[in-house]
Amino acid sequence: GDVNVVLEGGSGVGLVTMLIASCGVKAIHALEPQPMFFKTAVHNLEINGAAGVHMHRAALGVRDETADFSVRWLPYASALEGVPSKDIVRETIRVQVMDVNRAVAEFGANVLHLDIEGGEAEVLMGADLTPINKVVVEMHPHILGESTCSYIIHRLAEAGIEPCLVGNSDAFPNRCYVLGCAREPAASRIRAAGTDTRIINVITSWDFKKGERGGKAAADE
């Protein structure tokens, strides 16, 4: 299979990071800015013997900077300041932000995995996707709105990275879901393995320029 180097934005406590490591990737560079989660992720990776994982205490963004980070009472909803959320902020801390394009170049990444609580839109819109073969992103329509999520999908598709896998589709469209995208021929292989194409039809049916559905999707019938 492909030799994959994964850039992960939002490692949390490292559970998904460990899962990715078990898939035989060459390396994972996992970013996590929240101190408690970072410490827990490092511990979890160590005690479970996850190989090839490099943890970085930083957020993923579109420029190298120091920024405010909102730690919310629901810790998994924490995000960079300015990302919309209805969750109450417990405290605001300063964190390092790593530019996605510098990170991709420095680490030689060709796979992006993003779960940054609504920050995915800015990162994907600002990223040079030329080196990227696969993207796995947690979509947050309840935070960003469906039209922004649709724009993300079109942005990836325009770069040749097609939607091919949806996880947690039972929650669609009101809560977050996981979207897997890939370049060909990997996209066709993933689709052939089975996915809910009905959901993909729905989330790609929006006219993202007008912010409205561009036609009657299969799930609406």
Image (spheres, grey):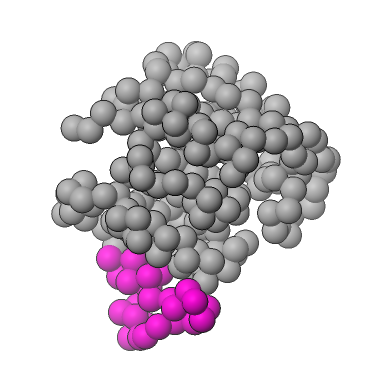
From the viewer's side, name the closer residue of 101 and 5. 101
Question: Is residue 15 found left or right of 165 in the rendered image?
Answer: right
Q: Is residue 19 in view from this perspective?
A: no
Q: Is residue 76 above or below residue 85?
A: above
- Give the quarter of the figure containing the C terminus: bottom left
Quadrant position of residue 202: bottom left
Residue found at x 17% / y 48%:
185
Q: How far across and down, in percent of the image, does residue 66 sit?
A: 73, 34
From the viewer's side, name the closer residue of 37 and 210. 210
- Give the quarter of the figure containing the N terminus: top left
Q: How far across and down, in percent of the image, does residue 91 sit?
A: 83, 40
Quadrant position of residue 21: top left
Quadrant position of residue 64: top right
Q: How far across and down, in percent of the image, does residue 69 sit?
A: 74, 41
Highlighted range, magenta: 197-221
**Residue 199 is covered by the magenta coloring:** yes
Q: Is residue 98 above or below residue 190?
A: above
Q: How far across and down, in percent of the image, does residue 173 sit?
A: 49, 68
Q: Is residue 124 in view from this perspective?
A: yes
Question: Is residue 62 found left or right of 65 in the rendered image?
Answer: left
Residue found at x 47% / y 74%:
208
